[in-house]
Image: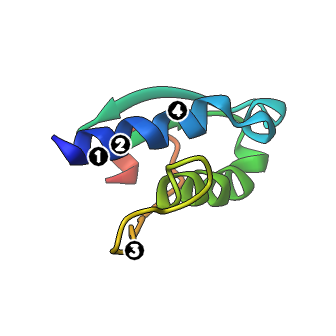
Amino acid sequence: GSAADVAMCAMLQISKNKQLKELGWKLLLQVHDEVILEGPTESAEVAKSIVVECMSKPFHGKNILKVDLSVDAKCAQNWYSGK
């Protein structure tokens, strides 16, 4: 229920993020509470920090919940390597 709503809000923040688009990153897939993006290797760390920010504050750049949302993020060449 509500976890899916939080994930959806985070995905909307990511997909609408202008800086991610300018860097050439796009949202490919969501699996439960994980998102997978694709983009150029040279901007991976910048994109990762943007995604972490979007996921930790998924409600229009804010976290309205009474608990913090912790986010783990990795950069890898493929999904299997990132696991």
Mark closest to the chain's N terminus, 1 or 4 = 4
Q: Position of residue 18 (x, y in %)?
A: 78, 34
Mark closest to the chain's N terminus, 2 or 3 = 2
Residue 49 to residue 41: above or below: below
Label 4 residue SS: helix
Label 1 residue SS: loop
Residue marked by disc 1: 33
Residue 68 to residue 52: above or below: below
Label 2 residue SS: helix
C-alpha separation, residue under disc 1 versus residue under disc 4: 13 Å
Kindly indicate whether the residue at mark 4 contacts the one at mark 3 (C-beta within 8 angstroms): no
Q: Nearer the viewer, mark 1 or mark 2?
A: 2
Mark closest to the chain's N terminus, 1 or 2 = 2
C-alpha separation, residue under disc 3 versus residue under disc 1: 15 Å
Residue 27 to residue 3: above or below: above
C-alpha separation, residue under disc 1 versus residue under disc 2: 6 Å
- Left-right relation of 16 to 18: left
Q: Nearer the viewer, mark 3 or mark 1?
A: 3
Residue marked by disc 4: 12
Q: Position of residue 22 (x, y in %)?
A: 84, 32
Amino acid type, label 4: Leu
Amino acid type, label 2: Ala
Amino acid type, label 3: Asp
Residue 60 to residue 65: above or below: above
Q: Position of residue 16 (x, y in %)?
A: 66, 30
Label 1 Cα neighbours within 10 Å, binned few <14 / some 14-19 / many ≥20:
some
Residue marked by disc 3: 68
50 or 43: which is nearer to us? 50
Residue 50 visible in the snapshot: yes
Residue 78 visible in the snapshot: no
Q: Nearer the viewer, mark 1 or mark 4?
A: 4
Residue marked by disc 2: 7
